[in-house]
Image (tube, rainbow, N blue to C red):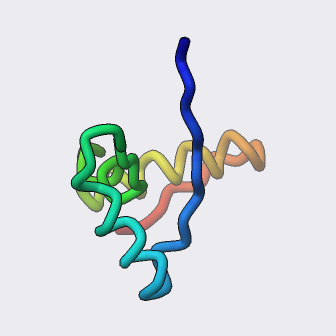
């Protein structure tokens, strides 16, 4: 039987961070935080980012503009 509970804790407040610190060291607790997901994301260069934005904007508006970087 898989008995789990999901809790959403606001870590922008000191009380929320305290709760997470208290429970994260327990064996039965697995903490998933958005910061961990952010660290796993790949980083792209400035030119690549704006190149993708240029493509998305042109596709959305049906234009063929070029951004001057």
Residue at point 47%, 84% (across, down): 15
Q: At which x and y percent is residue 56?
A: 60, 45
Q: 52 and 37: which one is in front?
A: 37
Compared across the picture, whether 60 is left or right of 13 comes to right
Q: How many marks?
A: 0
Compared across the picture, whether 12 is left or right of 7 comes to left
Q: 31 and 1: which one is in front?
A: 1
Q: Residue furthest top?
A: 1
Q: 28 and 17: which one is in front?
A: 28
Compared across the picture, whether 50 is left or right of 9 comes to left
Q: At which x and y percent is residue 39?
A: 25, 52
Residue at point 28%, 61% (across, down): 46
Residue 25 is drawn in which quadrant?
bottom left
Q: In which quarter of the image is the C terminus?
A: bottom left
Residue at point 30%, 68% (across, down): 21
Q: Which residue lies furthest to the bottom in this view?
A: 14
Q: Which residue lies furthest to the right in this view?
A: 61
Q: Quadrant of the N terminus?
A: top right
Q: 29 and 54: which one is in front?
A: 29
Q: At which x and y percent is residue 36?
A: 30, 51
Residue at point 47%, 76% (across, down): 16
Looking at the image, is 37 positioned above or below residue 19? above
């Amino acid at each position: 039987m898989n008995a789990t509970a999901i809790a959403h804790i606001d870590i922008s407040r000191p009380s929320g961070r305290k709760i997470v610190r208290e429970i994260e060291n327990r064996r039965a607790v697995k903490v998933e935080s958005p910061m961990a997901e952010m660290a796993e994301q790949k980083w792209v260069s400035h030119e690549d980012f704006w190149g993708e934005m240029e493509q998305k904007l042109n596709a959305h508006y049906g234009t063929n503009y070029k951004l001057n970087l």
